[in-house]
Amino acid sequence: QLVESGGGLVQAGGSLRLSCAASGFGFHDYAIGWFRQAPGKEREGVSCIKQSDGSTYYANSVEGRFTISSDNAKNTVYLQMNSLKPEDTAVYYCAANFEPYLKSPFIAPGYDYWGQGTQVTVSS
């Protein structure tokens, strides 16, 4: 099970930190990804972290503004989002992909578990 939290309404230029709490599966064997979906748009990969070696991946659109991190003791992954823009507005989902089967950090169908999503709204 994955449970996201931390979404909300923020002004452009502001920050939010999303959390993804995992339970019920071998957290340390999975890569955790963040995806987002805006109304009328495809779901897109935002960031991913591999638990095995700490490798991180970012979409070009968020590189330098977002930071993904993991607290293995808490089975929780965070997405720190700074310098938010109105185009970052979306429902954000975290997902888990068994690492040996990870083909690409941003291919959504490869992920095994998904959270329910948390809304992020950035006003201009």
Image: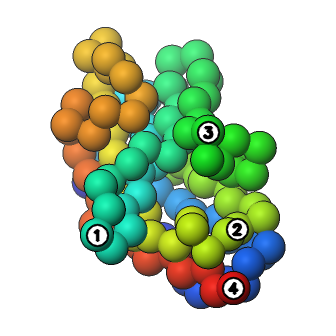
Residue at (50% x, 26% y) in the render = 50
Label 3 crowd bin: few (<14), some (14–19), many (20+), radius 10 Å: few
Distance between the Cα atoms at labels 1 and 3? 21 Å
Dot 3: element: loop
Residue 93 percent coordinates (x, y): 38, 58
Badge 1 amino acid:
Gly
Q: Which mark is residue 60?
A: 3
N-term-proximal mark, 2 vs 4 = 2
Asked if labels 2 and 3 touch by Cβ distance under 8 angstroms, the answer is no
Q: Is residue 55 above or below residue 65?
A: above
Label 4: which residue?
124
N-term-proximal mark, 1 vs 3 = 1
From the viewer's perspective, is the residue at label 3 or at label 2 nearer? 3
Q: Is residue 91 above or below residue 103?
A: below
N-term-proximal mark, 3 vs 4 = 3
Query: Could you say which quadrant of the image residue 113 lies in?
Result: top left
Q: Is residue 89 above or below residue 47?
A: below
Q: Which is more toward the observer, 5 or 118?
A: 118
Badge 3 amino acid:
Asn
Badge 4 amino acid:
Ser
From the viewer's perspective, is the residue at label 2 or at label 1 nearer? 1
Residue at (34% x, 46% y) in the render = 95
Residue 109 percent coordinates (x, y): 20, 37
Label 2: which residue?
84
Distance between the Cα atoms at labels 2 and 1? 20 Å
Q: Which is more toward the observer, 26 or 3?
A: 3
Distance between the Cα atoms at labels 1 and 4? 20 Å
| Image-based side of 25 in relation to 11, left or right | left
Q: Quadrant of the N terminus?
A: bottom left
Label 1: which residue?
40
